[in-house]
């Protein structure tokens, strides 16, 4: 794999979904390591310098 592809492997674009929402894809390898599943609930929190995505806990 070229070095350019490796650099851009985890660079993602925001995609418009519906009228007011945006989505971003998460690399499959990362989802597999976290053992997350499709339709699993997660929490999204704004933190200094970015966004924190965590498994949702009841």
Image (cartoon, grey):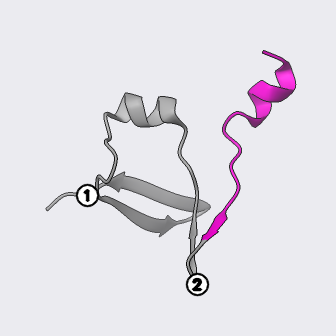
Q: Marks 1 and 2: in contact by CB < 8 Å?
A: no
Compared to residue 43, the image places residue 21 above or below, namely below
Q: Residue furthest bottom?
A: 19
Magenta-colored span:
1-16
Q: Residue furthest front?
A: 18
Q: Position of residue 54 (x, y in %)?
A: 35, 53
Q: Which mark is residue 56?
A: 1
Of 45 and 8, nearer the camera is 8
Residue at 53 percent of width and 61 percent of height: 51
Residue at 46 percent of width and 57 percent of height: 52
Residue at 51 percent of width and 65 percent of height: 47
Residue at 58 percent of width and 84 percent of height: 19
Q: For the residues marked 2 and 1, what is the alpha-carbon distance in whole angstroms?
A: 25 Å
Q: Is residue 4 magenta?
A: yes
10 Å crowding of disc 1: few (<14), some (14-19), many (20+)? few
Instruction: Mark 2 vs mark 1: give the one in front.
Output: 2
Count of numbered circles on the image: 2
**SS at mark 1?**
loop
**SS at mark 2?**
loop
Q: Position of residue 26 (x, y in %)?
A: 53, 45
- Name the side, left or right, on which 5 lies relative to 29: right
- Name the side, left or right, on which 50 lies relative to 52: right
Q: Position of residue 25 (x, y in %)?
A: 56, 50
Compared to residue 23, the image places residue 39 above or below, namely above
Q: Residue furthest left?
A: 58
Q: Quadrant of the N terminus?
A: top right
Q: Is residue 49 magenta?
A: no
- Which comes before the other along the chain, label 2 or label 1? 2
Compared to residue 31, the image places residue 47 above or below, namely below
Which residue is under mark 2?
19
């Amino acid at each position: 794999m070229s070095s350019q592809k490796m650099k851009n492997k985890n660079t993602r674009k925001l995609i418009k979904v519906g009228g007011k929402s945006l989505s971003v894809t998460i690399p499959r390898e990362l989802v597999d390591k976290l053992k997350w599943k499709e339709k699993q609930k997660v929490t999204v929190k704004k933190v200094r310098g970015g966004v924190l995505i965590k498994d949702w806990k009841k």
